[in-house]
Image (cartoon, rainbow, N blue to C red):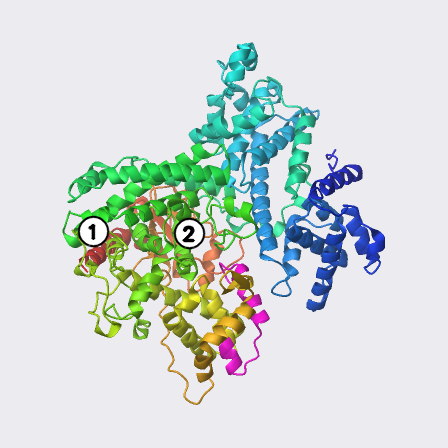
Amino acid sequence: MPPKKRNSGTTQSKELKLAAESGSADKKESPELSVKNHRDKDAEFVTLCKSLHVTDLVCDRAWTLWKTVQDGMEEVADSQKRLWGACLYVSATDMDVACFTLTQVLKAVSLNVKQFLALVRKLDVNLDTISTKVNSALTRLEKKYDVTLALYQRFEKTCKNIFALVSDSKERETIRSCWTMFLLAKGRALQMEDDLVISFQLLLCTLELCIKRCPPDLLQPLYKSAISKVQSPPTRTSRRNQSKAKSRPVEPEVDLQLLKTLCKDNECNAEEVKNVYQTSFSAFLDSLDLSRSPDFPQANELNQQYEEHYLKSRDFDGRLFFDGDETVLAPKVEISQVERTPKKNLSDEDTVLIPPQTPIRAAMNSIQQLRGDLTSSGDQPSTNLATYFKNCTVDPTQEVLKRLETLGQAFSQRFGQAVGPRCVVLGRQRFNLGVKLYYKVMEAMLKSEEKRLSVQNFSKLLNDSTFHTSLLACALEVVMATYGESSFKTGGYNHGGGGEAAETNVCFPWILDVVNLAAFDFYKVIESFIKADPTLSKDIVKHLETCENLIMERIAWRTGSPLFELLKLENEGGAAEQVETPASFSQPLQHNHTAADLYLSPMRPGLRVLPPESPATPSSQASSQPPTQPASQMPRLPKSNSLSLFYKKLYRLAYMRLKILCSYLLSSHPELEPIIWTLFQHTLQHEHELMRDRHLDQLMMSAMYAICKVKSVDLRFKTIVTAYKNMPNTNQETFKHVLITEGHYDSIIVFYNQVFMQKLKTNILQYASTRPPTLSPIPQIPRSPYKFPNSPLRVPGSNNVYISPLKSPRMSPGIMTPRSRMLVSIGESFGLSNRFQKINQMVNSSDRSFKRTLDLGSTPKPLKRLRFDVDGQDEADGSLIYSKSERDSTLIQKLAEMSSTRSRMQEQKMKEDAESRKE
């Protein structure tokens, strides 16, 4: 029989009453709704309010919001009751009144989490309908739901491997209690309940405890045998001296053998899980007085304690995942494409399925790859790096170690404050990984600089504190991103939704605040960091590229940024040339600047005290005297490499985003795009003070509206922001929370009228005259400034055959199988001969879509590249291929040529790298 649903009418009524009482503690008004005060409202709306125990103020505000939504929506597709529920949720969240939980309103309007979140976002019919506070709460809620769903799916799968099927309900009740205990542990131990990795590690800790304490007849043989035979009996702690136990709590004993079995089965690092157990999980057990008990926790006690946590959090009831409740069901359309994995290319008899790339598996693989790449790296400078330090005029070794000690303590403490009070040890682990990566990348950078400059004394660079802090911060950001703790779900904003949300958000640029580093200084190291470590995954490279974009869009423009000092020096006429000439826009974004050039490039005198020695080019020497003459009489200083490169990238990013927005809104007016760009570019170059404490996209939208206005094209700001919300990497705060005057923020419309238009009115009106300004050249947009060394390369002479090197010897070709392409791994059995015939037909076929028919009987789909993964050795000769019809096999000829082809490509790449270093 299916399990009974947890939320009966009586239980829900009790929950609502408790929630209403807890939410009204700080309110002067009565929590009871007075029906006579709401006779002007729809009776069904008032009934819904009463069933959710909302207050009079919330009822009034929700009704006002409903009227606004009703007037703003062209048609109301959803039922009124559902929209009322959304309005009540928005109003209660804005007013911070805990009338009801999310689950209670979901049940009242018969929607699941995803449907309800989408409905609430539909309410944003005007710029101010949904506040940034509500939007931040929605984002946090959605991420927490996604994480909990992924955890439950893994929990369900793991339990099938752990517990034996029995006839009675004993097994099911045990699993239910295990899941409830985990939810409670996650809520108690973590301030960030959306941390997937630590939550999953807590889940394994919970399973370890449940396995040890449940009856042996409920366990599968693997886990029954995994429990250590020499494990001390759980009752041992109760026989210890009581006075000693009071002075120092007894640490729960971890069954290492069992824990390793669990971790191996779930591809998780056992040492990390053990540390989570001994810190966060043991403290949780002590809080429930469970660490001393040999028995399995009582289900009623766990339920009661979780109930309190759930009502306090006011979001969804995590226990409903176990019940299969409709309010938490995963939408069927959200089945990821990567989970529809093709079969591994073994022989037909031995065909196996590749495990689906679920969120947890992806996270574990990323962590495993990072730790594997750092296996040979130590937490101390290597011999080669130590030699570079000693070759300096001023040996930086002691300063480096002292800085790491100081920043290590700061990072660990701040990590614990953000993630959970017992997670300081985990923060130290993250930091230690970051230090290894920091040393590894630094050594690679210095080797590259030595080849480029033919010097070994890097005293000026290695004694630059900003360079070291930036390099370490970048390494730590890579670690945080690998563990999923730094992501861009919020579009890079970590300050919305109240103080608590900001304190528990470790998304970039959190790391800059921790190490007290300016974003403009951090930007200088990103590109060199990526080039110095070819083992970085594409996801991490994209993450760092997003960090760079956020810096250019917004973070580098905050008051106090070194960027303004450089621009001030530029405007005073101290630099040899302007930041970026418009004539260079059409040139590719190519440069030979390294991190050394950027950190040692001219800065305003007095900003930095450095030793006089410098290995860099002459342009790294800055004037030591402050400017005392008028700008017209000042001697020309060398151009700032860091400022020049920053503006080159800024212009290309700005135009790329403008082009996307124009494609959404002005496809029928293509002639306006270059005009808008000219105004946009003029603003960035000559009115850059408008960017102070603002966002690049705010100027972009304002420039678009201004040009459309003077060109008599009907385009409203509401239409612009609606399209803008559909652009990648955007956040509603960009157009809802714009600086107007110091300390005062308002919408993008107010900014345009009171700031942008007032500053640029003369310039804007010129575009309506008969002699408009000269159009700015269009920047050339590269695919990405970063090269991916492991991307598939085309085999010369073929349009259809690509090869790529095996990225890591630790990963088998089966794990690397493309999700939507055929894989041929040289040296492995490929199966029957007819597969080669299929490949030959595919390579020779002019019908490119025929490639998809290789998967027998599958429907043809859009073309994907055919990739061959090889392990770096020249093995592609005809003797390795066996087929009954080799006579005219074009593919075999291609494979036979791969050895020389790959050699030529490697030689060409080495030549290009040598030329690049030479330049």
Q: Secondary structure beneath disc 2? A: helix
**Dot label at residue 449:** 1
Q: Which residue is mark 2?
A: 543
Name the residue at 56% across, 70% down.
749
Give the left or right position of residue 898, taking residue 4 as reference. left
Residue 261 visible in the snapshot: no
Look at the image and tell me in which quarter the C terminus lies: bottom left
Q: Are circles 1 and 2 on residues that touch, CB within 8 Å? A: no
* Residue 578 versus residue 537 in the image, above or below: below
- Range of residues picked out in magenta: 706-734
Residue 416 image position (x, y, % from top left): 47, 37
Q: What x and y, as percent, mark residue 458?
A: 18, 48
The three-letter code of the residue at mark 1 reads Glu
Amino acid at the residue labelled 2: His
Compared across the picture, whether 736 is left or right of 917 comes to right
The quadrant where residue 557 appears: bottom left
